[in-house]
Image (cartoon, rainbow, N blue to C red):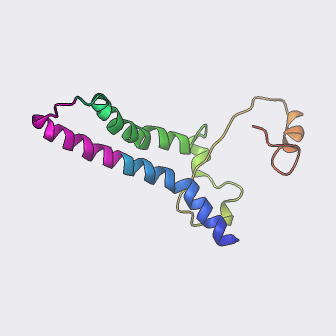
């Protein structure tokens, strides 16, 4: 069971990045190939050819801009670097993401918020 959880955790954290990097590399190679073979155009026009640069650039934008932002969604620099509850479960994690929200509320709200969550009052955020 522990091995299955490890495989699932790796798949959830790493596979999207690997897939995006693979698509970025494949799109780049295909775009370069298409540009090099542009001299020998087919007689049949290819209506999707203008979208090739978009297919090349989009995965690179995701890997360089969106993914790093998503891995620390809403978290401050301090929250990303400081130890958090649960870090001791996997001290040598191969990947890390920290999501956070800031709630401006009076102290009386916190006991109520602590009742929420998986296995308690419900799954809310």
| Residue placed most toward the observer, 30 or 60 | 30
Location of the C terminus by quadrant is top right
Q: Looking at the image, can residue 89 be seen?
A: yes
Q: Is residue 9 above or below residue 98?
A: below
Is 87 drawn above or below residue 72 in the view shown? below
Magenta segment boundaries in residue numbering = 24-44
Counting from the top left corner in percent of width and height, residue 3 is at 64, 71
* Residue 59 placement, left or right of 16: left
Residue sitting at x 29%, y 28%: 47
Residue 119 on image: x %, y %: 85, 52
Q: Give the main secondary structure of the magenta stretch.
A: helix
Residue found 16% across the figure and 31% down from its top: 43
Residue that appears at 35% across and 37% down: 55
Left or right relative to 100: residue 53: left
Residue 114 in picture, x, y percent from top left: 85, 44
What percent of the width, then of the height, locates residue 112? 89, 38
* Residue 50 against residue 10 in the figure, above or below: above
Horizontal arrangement in the rendering, residue 2 relative to residue 14 (left or right): right
Which image quadrant for residue 32? top left
In the picture, the quarter occupied by the N terminus is bottom right
Q: How many marks?
A: 0
Residue 27 magenta-highlighted: yes
Please state which of residues 74 and 60 is positioned toward the viewer in this rendering.
Answer: 60
Q: Is residue 39 left or right of residue 8?
A: left
In this view, the residue farthest toward the left is 39
Quadrant hosting residue 90 = bottom right
Magenta-span inclusion, residue 117 = no
Which residue appears at 48% of the width and 43% of the height? 67
Residue nearest the observer in this picture, 23 or 60: 23
Residue 90: in sight, yes or no? no
């Amino acid at each position: 069971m522990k091995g299955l959880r490890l495989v699932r955790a790796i798949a959830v954290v790493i596979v999207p990045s690997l897939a995006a990097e693979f698509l970025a590399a494949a799109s780049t190679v295909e775009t370069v190939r298409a540009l090099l073979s542009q001299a020998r155009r087919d007689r049949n026009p290819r209506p999707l050819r203008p979208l090739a640069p978009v297919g090349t650039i989009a995965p690179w934008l995701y890997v360089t801009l969106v993914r790093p932002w998503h891995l620390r969604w809403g978290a401050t620099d301090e929250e990303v670097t400081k130890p958090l509850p649960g870090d001791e479960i996997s001290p040598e994690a191969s990947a890390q993401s920290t999501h956070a929200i800031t709630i401006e509320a009076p102290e009386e709200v916190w006991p109520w918020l602590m009742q929420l969550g998986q296995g308690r009052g419900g799954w809310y955020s």
